[in-house]
Image (cartoon, helix red, strand yellow):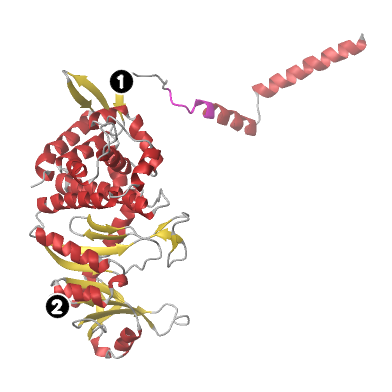
Amino acid sequence: MIRQQEKRLLFFSHLRLRYMHESHPSGEEKNSLVVRRSVAQERLGFKLGITTDTITSKSGLAVLHDAALAAGVVRSIREHLPVPGSNRGIRPEEYVMPLALMFCGGGQSMEDIREIARDQGLRELCGFKRIPSPDAVGTWLKAPRRITGLKQVNRHLCRVAIARSKQTEFTLDTDATLIETEKSSAKMSYQGFKAFAPLLSFLAELGLCVAGEYRDGNVSPAVGIKGQLVQTARFLKSLGRRLKYFRSDSAAYTAEVMNACFDSNITFAITADLDEAVKAVIAELPKQSWHRFKTPGGERTDREYAATVHCLGKSQCSFTLIVLRWPNPRPDLFEGSYRYHCIATNDYARATEQVIWFHNQRGNAENYNKEIKVGFGMDYAPCQSVRANAVYFEIGILAYNLVAAVKRLVLGGDWLTKTIATLRWQLIFIAGKVVWHGRRLMLRVARRHYHLLADIRARLGTALSPT
């Protein structure tokens, strides 16, 4: 009996202590209670529901597809790409345009074309009755005669953009890039990893990619530069325009490229190799020939420049060699007290500093390459075949050129400097409701987006229609 009373006393004393502990917690326990309560309260107060309305989150892609129609791109695809063998087969534009829009929308692989297929609202706006599967796309890419037709489609879009612009003289920036991959068909590049190596040429004034070649990673960056230079000069001449300037890194420092520029009366500014002949010329420069280099804003730098005459062994004519030097920060590791950068040019109309400023703008080509590779997802090689990857890459160039033409000829202003990543936030990813009203398809968006999209569509007909 005594033990039972002791147990009851211990039980009730334990309850009393527990009550007092919870009623008057310590400082650390108070903090833990506050944290637990705050975590439980940090939730949004909405509830999920289901709607049967047809909605798209990518209204801007429909506008880009409208731009492709206005520029005659879809018609050009039908004209230059082979049609299927039966009426039930998927037409070429049903492959190309969903892929191009997928790249504009941020797709990173062929599997992402399923997102276009799932977006019923976007499909209705663009008139896409069928979207091919990733496997069907892969099979289509490997078929012959695709790359030739797509290059003609890209040429058509460039022709429309150039003809509609007010520019009469152009600058060509050429640059090779590497697409690193683990594909067994890829070759080892000069940088020590397996890759494919596209060579791309851009019109600096419009940001258009007017020439491109998808190559194996072991191909020299210099291969194909002369061909793209001559091809672009003839293309512009056929449109009543002129290729006036050519810029490149040291890959174009060859006699055949310079001779092509001399033959076509093109002013070039090319990074020169620091070979033995150039080093000998630098060593002979007198001290009084060096001048302090200034930025375009007039700010003095730690660099000096000098100019002299030089000639390559097989070059038709001599050219000006501009030499930049600056103090060597590690003279114990490198020869001499200076580091050097040289520019080969036949620009005799501008001052030496102006030629240097002009040549430094060749970095835009690297930015264009980065935009195509990173912005449009072309740093991905979907197939083992170089030919199939070339087709995939050419569609990426088409998507890039379509956006570049819309920015330059339709949007203008601050839109010119926006990347595709920014355009997705401000133009492409606009939510809209797709409805039929009076037998007419309508896209309803927020008021602040309505005026933007309506203004763009109103300009498309005059800004991008083929002449």
The three-letter code of the residue at mark 2 reads Tyr
Q: Position of residue 291 (x, y in %)?
A: 24, 82
Give whichever of 310, 144 is nearer the camera.
144
Examine the image and state in which quarter residue 65 appears. top left
Magenta-highlighted residues? 39-45
Q: Depth check: 245 or 324 in front?
A: 245
Asked if 177 appears above or below 106 in the picture, the reply is below
Tell me the residue that label 2 is attached to. 348
Q: CA distance from mark 2 to mark 1?
A: 65 Å
Q: Which residue is mark 1?
A: 53
- Does 23 sit left or right of 348 as displayed? right
Q: Residue at x 34, y 35 (%)?
A: 132
> Which of disc 1 and disc 2 is earlier in sequence?
1
Q: Residue 94: where, in percent of width, then height?
A: 27, 37
Residue 382: x percent and y percent? Answer: 41, 48
In the image, residue 39 sits, relative to residue 329, either above or below, namely above
Whether residue 297 is visible here, answered yes or no, is no
Q: Secondary structure at mark 1?
A: loop
